[in-house]
Image: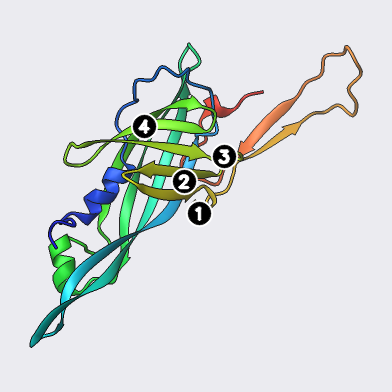
């Protein structure tokens, strides 16, 4: 039973945490859609063998579930050579579990437990991120992530596990830009004056380097 894991939270962090870009012969691609906050949930299943009756120790298998909430904040950077790089941070929260108290204590599963992580990776082709991970016990794990066409959904794969994160699941709202002018028309060849403003409801201010005319 202990061979399954005694550190169920760390097993998920192994799946999610990223530390260093992998060396690759593939030319990295630009993809600024790897920017924003992604959220989702993940379920870890634990199967154990327990006696069927206290006085008749015939073992039967039973499966329990542990549910996590995941939040990742990512930023997109680009080198002078045009290589796309992604870094960021996030946290994993143990939201609920069906483990009996004895197993919960053995596996270190406590509702409300929170673990932080950092991430970084390299965009190898458009929508594809190649990463490696560093767990809390300094174990290096390799993985990858794919971005949906609209940039809203991020699918992470590592250690034979898959987790889907989505920008809409974070409950945030996109920033709103307004472009104004005092002119009623725009004749060809005449210089016109435009001004713009930005509204953002998020607690973190929208970075100025993301504002591009």
**Circle 1 crowding by C-alpha within 10 Å: few under 14, some 14–19, many from 20:** some
User: Is residue 173 found left or right of 190 in the rendered image?
Assistant: left
Q: Nearer the viewer, mark 4 or mark 1?
A: 4
Q: Secondary structure at mark 2?
A: strand
Question: Who comes first in sequence, dot 2 or dot 4?
Answer: 2
Q: Is residue 105 visible?
A: yes
The vertical placement of 25 against 51, above or below, is above
Contact, CB < 8 Å: mark 3 with mark 4?
A: no
| Mark 4 to mark 1 CA distance (whole Å) | 23 Å
Q: Which residue is mark 1?
A: 169
Question: Who comes first in sequence, dot 4 or dot 1?
Answer: 4
Q: Nearer the viewer, residue 119 or 98?
A: 98
The residue drawn where x is 28% and y is 70% is 63
The residue drawn where x is 73% and y is 32% is 179
Q: Residue 11 location, x and y as percent?
A: 24, 50
The residue drawn where x is 34% and y is 25% is 22
Q: Nearer the viewer, mark 3 or mark 4?
A: 4
**Circle 4 crowding by C-alpha within 10 Å: few under 14, some 14–19, many from 20:** many
Q: Which mark is residue 131?
A: 4
**Circle 2 crowding by C-alpha within 10 Å: few under 14, some 14–19, many from 20:** many
Contact, CB < 8 Å: mark 2 with mark 1?
A: yes
Q: Secondary structure at mark 4?
A: strand
Q: Nearer the viewer, residue 137 or 74?
A: 137
The vertical placement of 111 against 175, above or below, is below
Contact, CB < 8 Å: mark 4 with mark 1?
A: no
Q: Quadrant of the C terminus?
A: top right
Q: Which residue is mark 3?
A: 151
Q: Which residue is mark 2?
A: 38
Question: Who comes first in sequence, dot 2 or dot 3?
Answer: 2
């Amino acid at each position: 039973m202990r061979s399954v894991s005694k550190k169920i939270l760390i097993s998920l962090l192994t799946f999610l945490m990223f530390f260093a870009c992998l060396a690759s012969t593939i030319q990295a691609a630009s993809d600024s859609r790897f920017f924003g906050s992604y959220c989702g949930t993940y379920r870890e299943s634990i199967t154990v063998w327990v006696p069927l009756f206290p006085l008749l120790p015939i073992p039967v298998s039973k499966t329990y579930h542990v549910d996590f909430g995941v939040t990742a904040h990512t930023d997109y950077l680009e080198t002078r050579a045009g290589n796309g790089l992604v870094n960021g941070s996030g946290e994993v929260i143990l939201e609920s579990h069906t483990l009996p108290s004895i197993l919960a204590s053995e596996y270190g599963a406590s509702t409300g437990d929170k673990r932080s992580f950092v991430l970084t990776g390299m965009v190898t082709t458009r929508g594809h991120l190649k990463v490696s991970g560093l767990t809390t016990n300094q174990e290096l794990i390799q993985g990858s992530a794919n971005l949906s066409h609209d940039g809203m959904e991020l699918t992470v794969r590592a250690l034979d596990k898959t987790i889907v994160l989505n920008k809409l699941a974070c409950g945030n709202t996109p920033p709103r830009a307004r472009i104004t002018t005092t002119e009623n028309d725009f004749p060809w060849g005449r210089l016109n004056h435009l001004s713009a403003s930005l509204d953002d409801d998020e607690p973190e201010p929208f970075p100025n380097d993301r504002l591009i005319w």
